[in-house]
């Protein structure tokens, strides 16, 4: 009996760490509107909401004006042995970084350990920084619109979920990033996708971006990981 329990535990840990559960969770979200007419209607509302949210994000940095990015021409095996010294971000507007939500968000970046599996303890000063950030974004049109949308959708615990989402710092390989989007936009978008339990599709300048948000294996009330990608599967 004990051996069976240990084997089951090892299998669960292996599946969780390998990302299989994460992929299953996301595919499950994609399948929901296929078999449920109500969810198909909800996914249309979610796409419209994300488009509206994009238009409301007046705090977004424009590439070429507020930020300049230098993308490596090519990456091959030799790149790992001879890494380039060029930084990805060549220029970032200090005026934008000194804005209320950016400044409050930057204070959060040293609060968390990027390595998974390490116990972390939140200090009083860190809690003050978290609430300062939440207060700053709550004054923006992006968060106010998000609150109205979720309230109408009857999705509870909005504050507690996007509070959990402020835990930045986890690392992953091969991920995409949204360039220039404000902290409030990403937090609002991912929180809504998580609470709706549906794939988030955002179309910008004719390009479709899918927002991935999966749940914890043992606690589905909390997000596991959130990131953008250029295609659903």
Image (cartoon, grey):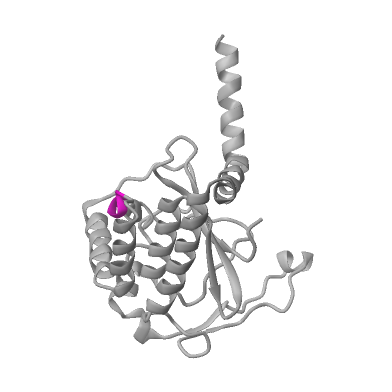
Q: Where is residue 224 shown, x and y percent of the image?
A: 48, 47
Q: Is residue 88 magenta?
A: no
At 46% from the left and 62% from the top, the residue drawn is 46
| Residue at x 59%, y 14% (from the top left corner) | 4
Q: Which residue is drawn at 36% across and 58% down?
A: 166
Q: Which residue is drawn at 57% across and 68% down?
A: 209
Q: Which residue lies furthest to the bottom in this view?
A: 65
On the image, the x and y values in percent for residue 78 come to 77, 67
Please tell me whether the stretch drawn in magenta is mainly helix, strand or loop: helix
- Rendered-image quadrant of the N terminus: top right
Magenta region = 156-160
Looking at the image, which is closer to me, 75 or 213? 213
Question: From the viewer's perspective, is residue 35 above or below residue 103?
Answer: above
Residue 173, by quadrant, is bottom right
Q: Position of residue 153 (x, y in %)?
A: 35, 55
Query: Is residue 158 found inside the magenta-colored segment of the image?
Result: yes
In the shown orientation, is residue 125 left or right of residue 79?
left
* Residue with the most extreme top position: 1
């Amino acid at each position: 009996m004990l051996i069976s329990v240990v084997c089951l535990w090892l299998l669960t840990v292996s599946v969780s760490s390998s990302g299989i559960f994460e992929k299953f969770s996301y595919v499950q979200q994609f399948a929901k509107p296929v078999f449920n007419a109500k969810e198909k209607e909800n996914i249309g509302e979610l796409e419209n909401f994300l488009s509206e949210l994009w238009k409301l994000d007046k705090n977004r940095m424009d590439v070429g004006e507020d930020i300049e990015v230098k993308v490596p021409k090519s990456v091959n095996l030799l790149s790992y042995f001879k890494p380039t010294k060029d930084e990805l971000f060549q220029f970032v507007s200090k005026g934008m970084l000194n804005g209320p939500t950016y400044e409050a968000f930057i204070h959060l970046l040293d609060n968390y350990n990027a390595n998974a599996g390490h116990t972390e303890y939140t200090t009083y000063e860190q809690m003050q920084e978290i609430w300062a950030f939440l207060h700053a974004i709550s004054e923006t049109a992006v968060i106010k619109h998000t609150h109205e949308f979720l309230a109408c959708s009857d999705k509870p615990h909005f504050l507690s979920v996007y509070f959990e989402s402020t835990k930045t710092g986890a690392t992953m390989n091969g991920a995409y990033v949204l360039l220039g989007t404000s902290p409030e936009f990403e937090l609002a978008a991912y929180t809504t996708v998580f609470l709706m339990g549906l794939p988030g599709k955002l179309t910008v300048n004719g390009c479709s971006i899918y927002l991935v948000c999966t749940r914890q294996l043992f606690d589905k009330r909390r997000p596991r990981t959130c990131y953008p990608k250029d295609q659903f599967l």
